[in-house]
Image (tube, helix red, strand yellow):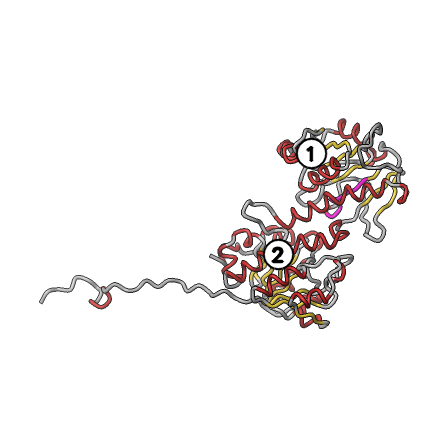
Amino acid sequence: MSKQLSPFTKAQLLPQEETLEVYKKKGDLFIGIPKETYFQEKRVCLTPDAVSALVSNGHRVMIESGAGEGANFKDKNYSEAGAEVTKDTAKVYSCPIILKVEPPSLDEIQLINPQTLLISALQLKTQNKKYFEALASKRITALAFEFIKDEDGAYPAVRALSEIAGTASILIASELLSNVNGGNGLMFGNISGVPPTEVVIIGAGTVGEFAARSAIGLGANVKIFDNSITKLRSVQSNLGQTLYTSTLQPKNLVKALKRCDVAIGAVRGLNRAPIVVTEAMVNTMKSGAVIIDVSIDMGGCFETSEITSHDHPTFEHNGIIHYCVPNIPARYSRSASVSISNIFTPYLLNIAENGGIENALRFDRGLKNGLYFYHGILTNKSVADWFDLKFSDVNLLIF
């Protein structure tokens, strides 16, 4: 009798069908949009048009009554778009997906069901450890929209709001310069025979670029300062014209500040905005000049800056008007809401198309970058370092 050479039986050696992963079918989302309770937050995540697009794709949207009031979207607009409008806050927070502009408060987290998907801003600098412990106890999966990347590696939500803040800073400055608001009575605009308004912009990022674009459009004389030559070069090429650009050399900066009518601070730092303009430099500026510190949400880059609110936006220091409101886009709440909504809607449709957040995170690396909590496990290293918490690499949890 011949000895059997193989450890397998004849049946085991027969070719088998390959077993492939069964992909989840396209899912239906149920999205809850609560009313923003954060101080002076008037924006809303989805506009009625975006709700209409989601509803026509077979998804459900529940919105708290009055959520769009700050951006002048009425409950009637949402209800006509197909959303369910309710006055019950707890009912909105019981939805499997929660969409917010500002991060939820600790009381609001208590209303959220376990295993919910939360999409909002994170605003790391204003959070405390209890917020993350509360999310972990509810095993919540949380995405921060300021961390979400697109295909080009840029941050679409941050860029969109920076564009608004940059353009708004010039519009606010032009208001503050007029006599109506007790300014110098200067007008932005290249009037024949009148010297143009001098604008100094510190920081050549998105805010700086859009501030420069608006100022040039209004006929002002613009000077941009930044320590990155690459950024200065890209601003010049994006604006399509040559401008006065300089690195942050104190001598050049003091000279420009002495002559300027408007100074805009748009420098971001790693943990805090660096103080680029000292009090002594501010004191050399013209009386009635306007300082708009856009980077006040990260501490401000003018030494004399103090945080203000939309109700009382300005204060004077040595005859120089300071505007230091941290949340400038909320002033133009409707435009900001449309901008945020246009970023969110494709992501929500994509999550549904992939059959839920789990699959969407596997295929979309940019979305995965926005994840900071996955079923109650912290997955963002910068959050872990800032608050001294334990974290797990997201790639070990989703692959």
Which badge, 2 or 1, is on the more N-terminal residue? 1
Residue in the foreground of this view, choosing between 38 and 397: 38
Q: Amino acid type of disc 2? A: Phe
Identify the element where label 1 is drawn: loop
Q: Is residue 30 magenta?
A: no
Give the residue displayed 71% in from the left and 63% down from the top.
Answer: 105
Residue on which disc 1 sits: 226
Q: Position of residue 376 (x, y in %)?
A: 58, 63
Q: Amino acid type of disc 1? A: Asp
Using residue 394 as the reference point, say whether residue 44 is left or right of it.
right
Q: Position of residue 1 (x, y in %)?
A: 9, 67
Mark in the foreground, 2 or 1: 2
Q: Tell me: residue 259, above or below residue 72.
A: above
Q: Which mark is residue 1?
A: none
Labels 2 and 1 touching (C-beta < 8 A): no
Using residue 81 as the reference point, say whether residue 394 is left or right of it.
left
Residue on which disc 2 sits: 344
How far apart, in angstroms, are the residues tagged by discs 2 and 1?
A: 32 Å
Using residue 186 as the reference point, say whether residue 339 is left or right of it.
left
Q: Position of residue 312 (x, y in %)?
A: 85, 51
Identify the image quadrant of residue 190. Answer: top right
Q: Which residues are magenta?
A: 291-297
Q: Is residue 294 magenta?
A: yes
